[in-house]
Image (cartoon, rainbow, N blue to C red):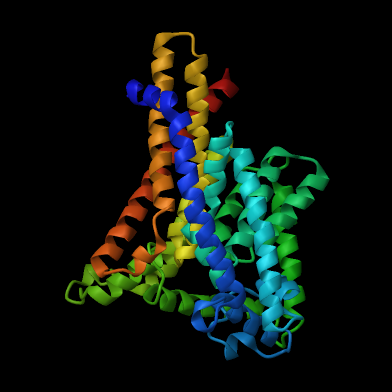
């Protein structure tokens, strides 16, 4: 174990530039193609999600009962209000250009954030981490005109600001960023537990700021429809349930909804009364809420640990808890950065250690965190078209991704538990 760590430390200056060079050529070439697809792609290949958003926004602000008229309208009212500045006042072609410009800005912000937060030191480490946000999920989301690139930097910055700052101006800014990230709640809603339990200072103020801000946006959006805000939220929830079941059967993968859909289609247990619930998609919502509740208890229990450990575990839960497509794999960026931070901390501690037992312990930590980070990085750079390959290849791709995500979650969960114990001992001393 120690030899592996020392081998890496001795050769990283040679290996990293080669890896960075190869990844840069591959990632940047594919990124350019996805921006071209976003702006000029025709048919279903180009900006398909942006076109769906555009239609919904146009209907919404024309007063048409959008949830009744448009089955693809599966976002809450506040989301369409937040989309209006990009899609509400332009024709489709210029809206695609504006979307591309704002996506590029958000991507640069995201790259800056992860480099700053990763503790990367050398130029090669910074380049390696900086390329991570340009992996297959991000690129696919950009070409489709998805929201994931917009919300990720806003989510990260807002949650970290809540955790680290207690002054009112910073909290208001953090609340605005978290509310903006809730434009896609199936990705970001699980992170609200961090706002509720892991914010600095008076715990209730961040909750009030976020809930009031989102509520005001919902009321504002409802003003453009005949139905009340409560009725619209009910319509959205019903529509989202149907959309999740449909999406799980037509492109969603590696999540609870897809598993329930597969069980429903491939199990026949009617002769076993105690097992008839298996494969029943009606259980999807209770299971989703159960996962969300368990995550909330876990965040409350570990609220004083490094926020990146919380971000990492919440991200994995968010990726698995409900319906997602491949572009939502961008969530795995967060636990991957958390693993790299642990690797850097353990590597620095092993160098600074003055005793042989503590040096060996830090080497062991560096080894395992480095191994987990490497596996996560390799999963991130795998070609996305493997999911659409032959069934056996697609199944192997899905199984390997889920196995790596779960390994990340378990690893970060163990580290969070260890840090919680350490913090508890220091507070009681």
- The percent coordinates of residue 31 (x first, y second) are 54, 61
Quadrant where the N terminus is found in the figure: top left
Is residue 226 visible in the rendered image? The answer is yes
- The percent coordinates of residue 211 (x first, y second) are 70, 60
Q: Nearer the viewer, residue 277 or 209?
A: 209
Residue shown at the point (52%, 27%) measured from the top left: 345
- The percent coordinates of residue 315 (x first, y second) are 50, 52
Q: Nearer the viewer, residue 317 or 140?
A: 140
- The percent coordinates of residue 293 (x first, y second) are 49, 55
Residue shown at the point (49%, 43%) measured from the top left: 20
Horizontal arrangement in the rendering, residue 297 relative to residue 220 (left or right)? left
Horizontal arrangement in the rendering, residue 367 relative to residue 196 (left or right)? left
Q: Nearer the viewer, residue 53 or 272?
A: 53
Residue shown at the point (43%, 66%) measured from the top left: 286
Residue 320, image quadrant: bottom left
Residue at the limit of the structure toward the left, as seen here: 271
Residue at the limit of the structure toward the top, as seen here: 355
Instruction: Relative to 390, say whether 25 is above or below.
Output: above
Instruction: Relative to 374, say whether 61 is above or below.
Output: below
* Number of dots carrying numbers: 0
Residue shown at the point (72%, 85%) measured from the top left: 225
Is residue 293 visible in the rendered image? The answer is no
Quadrant where the C terminus is found in the figure: top right
């Amino acid at each position: 174990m120690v030899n592996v760590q020392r081998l890496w430390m001795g050769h990283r200056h040679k290996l990293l530039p080669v890896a960075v060079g190869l990844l840069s050529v591959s990632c940047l070439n594919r990124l350019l193609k996805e921006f071209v697809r976003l702006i000029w792609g025709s048919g279903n290949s180009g900006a398909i999600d942006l076109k769906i958003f555009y239609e919904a926004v146009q209907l919404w602000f024309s007063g048409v009962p959008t949830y009744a008229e448009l089955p693809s309208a599966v976002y809450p009212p506040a989301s369409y209000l937040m989309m209006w500045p990009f899609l509400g006042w332009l024709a489709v072609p210029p809206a695609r250009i504006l979307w591309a410009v704002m996506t590029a800005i958000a991507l640069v912000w995201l790259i800056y954030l992860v480099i700053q937060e990763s503790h990367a030191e050398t130029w090669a480490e910074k380049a390696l981490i900086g390329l991570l946000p340009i992996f297959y999920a991000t690129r696919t989301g950009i070409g489709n005109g998805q929201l994931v690139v917009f919300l990720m930097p806003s989510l990260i910055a807002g949650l970290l600001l809540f955790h680290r700052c207690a002054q009112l101006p910073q909290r208001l800014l953090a609340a605005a960023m978290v509310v903006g990230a809730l434009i896609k709640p199936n990705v970001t809603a699980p992170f609200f537990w961090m706002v509720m339990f892991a914010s600095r200072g008076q715990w209730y103020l961040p909750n009030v700021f976020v809930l009031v801000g989102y509520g005001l946006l919902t009321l504002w959006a409802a003003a453009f429809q005949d139905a009340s805000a409560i009725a619209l939220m009910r319509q959205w929830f019903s529509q989202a349930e149907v959309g999740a079941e449909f999406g799980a059967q037509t492109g969603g993968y590696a999540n609870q909804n897809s598993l329930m859909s597969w069980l429903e289609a491939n199990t026949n247990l009617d002769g076993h009364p105690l097992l008839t619930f298996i494969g029943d998609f009606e259980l999807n919502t209770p299971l989703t809420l159960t996962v969300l509740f368990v995550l909330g208890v876990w965040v409350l229990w570990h609220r004083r640990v490094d926020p990146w450990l919380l971000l990492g575990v919440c991200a994995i839960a968010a990726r698995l808890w409900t319906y997602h497509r491949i572009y939502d794999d961008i969530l795995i960026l967060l636990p991957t950065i958390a693993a790299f931070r642990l690797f850097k901390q353990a590597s620095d501690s092993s160098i600074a250690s003055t005793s042989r037992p503590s040096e060996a312990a830090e080497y062991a930590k560096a080894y395992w965190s480095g191994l987990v980070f490497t596996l996560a990085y390799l999963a991130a750079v795998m070609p996305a078209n493997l999911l659409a390959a032959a069934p056996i290849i697609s199944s192997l791709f899905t199984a390997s991704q889920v196995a790596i995500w779960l390994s990340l979650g378990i690893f970060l969960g163990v580290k969070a538990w260890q840090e919680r114990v350490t913090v508890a001992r220091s507070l009681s001393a």
